[in-house]
Amino acid sequence: MAFSMKNYGIQSMLKEGHKHLSGLEEAVLKNIDACKQLSAITRTSLGPDGMNKMVINHLDKLFVTNDAATIVNELEVQHPAAKILVLAGKAQQEEIGDGANLTISFAGELLQNAEELIRTGLHPSEIISGYTKATTKTIEVLEELVEKGSENMDVRDKEQVVTRMKAAVASKQYGLEDILSSLIADACIQVSPKNPANFDVDNVRVIKLVGGGLHNCMVIRGMVLKGDAVGSIKHVEKAKVAVFASGVDSSATETKGTVLIHSAEQLENYAKTEEAKVEELIKAVADSGAKIIVSGGAVGEMALHFCERYKLMVLKISSKFELRRFCRTTGTAALLKLSQPKPDDLGFIDSVSVEEIGGSRVTVVRSEEGGNKVATVVLRGSTDSILDDLERAVDDGVNTYKAMCRDSRIVPGAAATEIELARRLKEFSFKETGLDQYAIAKFAESFELVPRTLAENAGLNPMDIISKLYEKHASGNTKVGINLRGGDSEDGVCKDVSAMNIWDLYVTKFFALKYAADAACTVLRVDQIIMAKPAGGPARRDKPAGMDED
């Protein structure tokens, strides 16, 4: 007789093959450990002297970058608690477009300090209560640290834009921030609408061309299309343009039909009628005043022949998104079929020319006058990975411009804000009674992550710098931060940020700290992990290596 022992407890409730982890040791501390590992990866990339990471994703694509959003995206984090930090970083990236590293690193630091408190005997709910109070107080103090007068800003004043953008660009490309910030500011100001709050990030395009160096980069009013013009006409100025989304070719009939031809004469006439039809369509476009035809699909040989005869320039744009941007730049309405366009459907371009930049032939579409909708930053660099990193710096700069259009307030950068927050929160924790005060003190201590990491990444002595910063801030100078360019002043490496002109946007700090605290509290609230048995069936096949994102 076979003896089978019945399962009891949670085993009897769930299917065989499930996993169940509970309690402090198994669930809470393991979750904290996973989050610490993730923040340890991103932390060394924080700040201007942040180190690069070499990440090879599941498609064998290589990324060399210090951009935390890209790193965590490509790592494909599996642990459910660490994924919460990744989501916080993504939320920051989508909301502001900068500060994802601060979010993930700060959340990791909060959890590390929470672990110390748990080991000394505090309950996670007491820590959460303390962290929530500390977050509210932090937001109050952050409001007080805002530079007076910074809420009023002209977003078309290049100097003010560069001041606010410089720190975000420097964190990606240290040493090149002056050149890059100037380029990005020019591009953003060109496409800034009447109401700056409606600024669209998509209107600043980036094109990467290998070769040359950063001094060869430029901003073009209009678009730059990779590739040559289709016909022999390579340059047109002040011309009307017609866009055909489905291609320029003799169209096939909607229904299938059979043509019965009895004689050679009929065959000849049949070929001629097709030719005459195509010529009629191209002539109609030329008569409408258009000098340029843009095709979203294939350009037929016969159609091209007649375009050349009627002196029409032909461009081909395969991507429908690029075609939409082209229509937006030129104010054209895209037509579905090759037909005579109405005057309202035509757009206008100042000049289109095929130029050679560093061995690549590109078509430059300039739209200098009137409502300019799109600007393009042409980036030059020696390798693809350098260009990718430059593009990320430009993205950060453009996102920062969008954020400053909504809220232009600034706070001191270079870790000055964090030290002041740490000092004020420590004072606040002494006034609290109950066990919350320990959590608030640890929250304050977590802010030291930023000056410590900036100093470590720059190869300076972190303890020495943090104590100097505290000393300066205690004596009332709340704008003293770290000067990474070396100790040229008698203060060693601590300097007033208004002299160095390093400012961070208030919204970037506000959301980064808020998301980090929320993510940390979410992880601390988990006391059990229950994983069902994974579904059966064949494993999900990955795409073959080497395929691109599209």
Image (tube, rainbow, N blue to C red):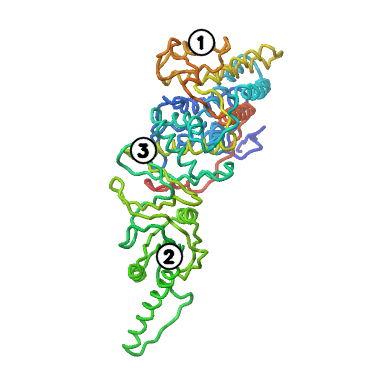
Residue bearing the label numbered 3: 385
Residue in the picture at 38% in, 34% down: 64
Residue in the picture at 57% in, 42% down: 196
Residue bearing the label numbered 1: 467
Between marks 2 and 1, how big is the CA–CA gap? 70 Å
Q: Residues within 10 Å of mark 1 (few under 14, many from 20)?
A: few
Residue bearing the label numbered 2: 290
Tell whether label 1 touches label 3 (CB within 8 Å).
no
Residue 75 falls left or right of residue 29: left
Which structural element holds mark 2? strand
Amino acid type shown at disc 3: Ser
Earlier-in-chain disc, 2 versus 1: 2
Viewer-nearest of discs 3 and 1: 1
Which structural element holds mark 3? helix
Q: Residues within 10 Å of mark 3 (few under 14, many from 20)?
A: some
Q: Is residue 127 above or below residue 537?
A: above
Earlier-in-chain disc, 3 versus 2: 2
Q: Position of residue 207 (x, y in %)?
A: 39, 45
